[in-house]
Image (spheres, rainbow, N blue to C red):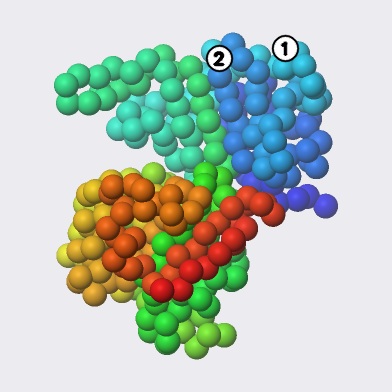
Amino acid sequence: MENKMNRILKQGILPVLAPELRRIINHIDDNQIDDLIEIRLRVGNPLILERRRGELIVDSRGYRIKDIKQGYLVTIKDIKDTLNLMTRSSLFTLEGEIKAGFFTLTGGHRVGLVGQVIADEQGIKRIKHISGLNIRICQEIIGAGDKVVKEIVRGRNDIYNTLIISPPRCGKTTLIRDLTRQLSDGIPTLKFNGLKVGVVDERSEIGGAYQGVAQNRLGVRTDLLDRCPKAEGMMLLIRSMSPDVIVTDEIGSEEDVKALQEAINAGVRIITTVHGSSLDELKLRPSLKEIINTNTFQRIIILSHRQGAGTVEKIIKI
């Protein structure tokens, strides 16, 4: 029986990989990549498949190897052919996205890239001579928020302001994506009516938007701002879409915090995330100290990877 990852690869990833890369990955045993997260391509270096249980390096036959020197070496042709397939031979049409360092494929898969940066005093103008790609596999997990959603619901038509603290790769984006869906659609088992949710997706990771349309299920009452800076996006949503809830990922700057406070003062509920391992750690950061100490968030969820991505270590109720 074909597993979920195999379907994702066949439908959204393999068709846009260079022929040689496609052939190699096709020959890898399905059980070795059923938890695939990223495909890393670096010119002159081994093809590396990042999995939740650790990286996988294979040779030109798709066989796992222990000696990294025996791994298949990615060529500049692999990179060029892959980019041509991904952009339908029209790389220039994505120049605006590429200068931000990434673009999104159909299905919500995100492609990060590196190369020679052309910049001036106003910032990055373009990236050329692309030498590396990071293909991040998009996998929405319906039900990822089941364990915590009942803790943030506050009656039929309200929720608590919620902060999710998590180290990298511990499932915070997967969690807020599913919470967004549930809060937008409504939760019959909790007698919770759906709310208007505005998502500011600065890095195209929550909605995984392709040409402005979310590729992940965010709910019927959700409005998405893709690739929009968080602080500006929150104010834009309040002015134009009258959301009940605003969802963002990875706050950190003083501008982000100020916008969060303005949204809350406007009567909008907030769900957001931040990189970290504990509440005490956040209190040491100047930009976050005040918003933590003033109990802006009534629910604080701490994630880890202790029992796999998305492990809920603690839910703090304030």
Question: Does residue 300 show up?
Answer: yes
Q: Name the residue under label 2.
A: 43
- In primary-sequence order, the first of circles 1 and 2 is 2
Quarter of the image with the C terminus is: bottom left
Q: Which residue is drawn at 17% across and 26% down?
A: 122
Q: Where is residue 228 in the image (x, y as percent from the top left)?
A: 29, 48
Nearest the eye: 25 or 237: 237
- Measured along the vertical axis of the image, is residue 253 above or below residue 301? above
Question: Does residue 141 show up?
Answer: no
Nearest the eye: 151 or 290: 290
126 displayed left or right of 133 = left
SS of the residue under disc 2: loop
> How far apart in space, not on screen, are marks 1 and 2 (Cα)?
14 Å
Q: Which amino acid does label 1 sit on?
A: Lys
Q: Quadrant of residue 62?
A: top right
85 displayed left or right of 100 = right
Q: Where is residue 206 in the image (x, y as percent from the top left)?
A: 45, 53
Nearest the eye: 290 or 259: 290
Q: Mark 1 points at which residue?
A: 69
Q: Are the residues at dot 1 and dot 2 in contact (C-beta closer than 8 Å)?
A: no
Front tag of 1 and 2: 1
Q: Residue at x 70, y 45 (%)?
A: 35
Q: Where is residue 233 in the image (x, y as percent from the top left)?
A: 25, 54
Q: Quadrant of residue 48?
A: top right
Q: Which amino acid does label 2 sit on?
A: Val
120 displayed left or right of 69 = left
